[in-house]
Amino acid sequence: MNESLKILLVVAFLIVILWNLGAGLYYMLVDKGQSKRTVNALTRRIVLSVALILLVILAIYMGWITPHGVGSNPH
């Protein structure tokens, strides 16, 4: 898998997660507890967050990405 494709996939997940978080806030303010749209948006955010974490774990296990410490020297 291409390095830029990996980054694009993670960034796309994060954008969709933030979109659902914003949608949950919007629905909470607009609906004032009269509908389930807030719960649905926040549930989708949680599911996407868990899916992203599992995808990263799978990618590390399969060797597609290699973890490194923050600020560590790669040599």
Image (spheres, rainbow, N blue to C red):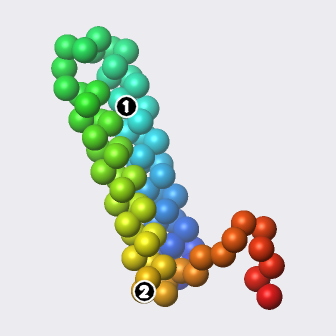
Q: Residue at x 78, y 68 (%)?
A: 71
Q: Residue at x 60, y 76 (%)?
A: 67
**Measured along the vertical axis of the image, is residue 47 above or below residue 30?**
below
Question: Which of 71 and 9 lies nearest the eye of the viewer?
Answer: 71
Q: Is residue 3 visible?
A: yes
Question: Which of 49 and 69 lies nearest the eye of the viewer?
Answer: 69
Distance Cα–Cα, label 2 vs label 1: 34 Å
Mark 2 vs mark 1: in front: 2
Where is residue 6 shown, x and y percent of the image?
51, 73
Disc assigned to residue 62: 2
Q: Is residue 1 visible?
A: no
Query: Secondary structure beneath disc 2?
Result: helix
| Type of the residue with mark 1 | Ala
The residue carrying pointer 2 sits among few (fewer than 14), some (14 to 19) or many (20 or more) residues within 10 Å by Cα, namely: few
Question: Which of 12 and 74 lies nearest the eye of the viewer?
Answer: 74
**Measured along the vertical axis of the image, is residue 34 above or below residue 49?**
above
How many labels, in total?
2
The residue carrying pointer 1 sits among few (fewer than 14), some (14 to 19) or many (20 or more) residues within 10 Å by Cα, namely: some
| Type of the residue with mark 2 | Met
Q: Residue at x 19, y 26 (%)?
A: 36
Answer with left or right where residue 29 lies relative to residue 1: left
Point out the residue furthest to the left here: 35
Answer with left or right where residue 65 lies relative to residue 72: left
Where is residue 20 shown, x and y percent of the image?
37, 39
Asked where in the image residue 26 lies, by quadrant, the reply is: top left
Residue located beneath label 1 in the image = 23
Q: In the rendered structure, which disc, 2 or 1, sits on the residue that comes first in sequence? A: 1
Where is residue 15 shown, x and y percent of the image?
47, 49
Question: Which of 12 and 38 lies nearest the eye of the viewer?
Answer: 38
